[in-house]
Image (cartoon, rainbow, N blue to C red):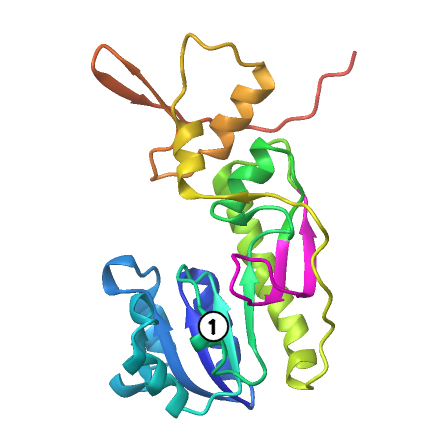
Amino acid sequence: MRLVCFVNNWTGWQVLDYLQDQEDEIAGLVLHPPDRRTFGDEILSTFDPGPDAIFDGSKLRDPGVIEAIGNLEPDLGVSVLFDYILRKPMLDLFPEGVVNLHPAYLPYNRGQYPNVWSIVEGTPAGTTLHYLDEGIDTGDVIAQRRVEVEPADTGETLYRKLERAGVDLFRDTWPLIRAGDPPRFPQPEGGTSHRTADVERIDAIDPDRRYTARELIDVLRARTFPPYDGAYFDVNGRRIHLRLELTERPCPEA
């Protein structure tokens, strides 16, 4: 198959590296703009198709970009941690569709920060490979894998688990996609969705508000992800950021 890959971050880099070793042809690469890329240098060192086949993900509604990607005659799109929504004119370029790797156990935690919400809301954590439609993480599922949330997990440690699980799921499922008959089933009703603003809301800790101990611990550990600032409280014109250091030991015998 001829592929166009929409990738970002470590997971996108690892998936692209895996695809390089397969028998399919990567015809084009779509990246975040330079100021929004993560692992951009690593991605381009793994695969550089030349300037005429590298596209700016922020310009996917530009008719010229749509035409240029269409001229590559792709069969399938592969999207990994790509933050721009693909609209119908772009999706229609791919006769086999576009598959997306999302670090959540859909239908839970569509959108942003799945690692945070699995801790804060207690929703299932995992990774899902699914087809893209015009919604946000709403397309038919190809394969999923659960990831356990441990009591000592932080937002960072859970994120790393989801990264590894996502790469493993993609590698295990790709042969089915290449064979042309992967599993496909609609997502269950319900689930949860979140925007970036939802995380900004829980980051603001009100020292005068009543929290249960579990609620506060879960917010603080979910937002512990150095070097990012995470949760905070304001006092006397100063903003104080909070992180948790979690150490696990066996409980003492009674």
Instruction: Specify the segment rendered in magenta.
Output: 127-148
- Residue 107 lies left or right of residue 79; in this view the side is right
Note whether 235 is above or below 54 in the view shown.
above
Q: Hey, what amino acid is under mark 1?
A: Lys
Q: Under tag 1, what secondary structure? A: helix
Provide residue 137's location: percent of width, then percent of height: 56, 57
Query: Is residue 245 found inside the magenta-colored segment of the image?
Result: no
Between 90 and 22, the one lying in front of the other is 90
Note whether 188 is above or below 116 in the view shown.
below
Note whether 31 is above or below 127 in the view shown.
below
Note whether 188 is above or below 119 in the view shown.
below
User: Can you say which quadrant of the picture contains the C terminus?
Assistant: top right
Provide residue 189's location: percent of width, then percent of height: 71, 50
Count of numbered circles on the image: 1
Query: Is residue 136 found inside the magenta-colored segment of the image?
Result: yes
Kindly identify which residue carries mark 1.
88
Q: Residue at x 50, y 80 (%)?
A: 92
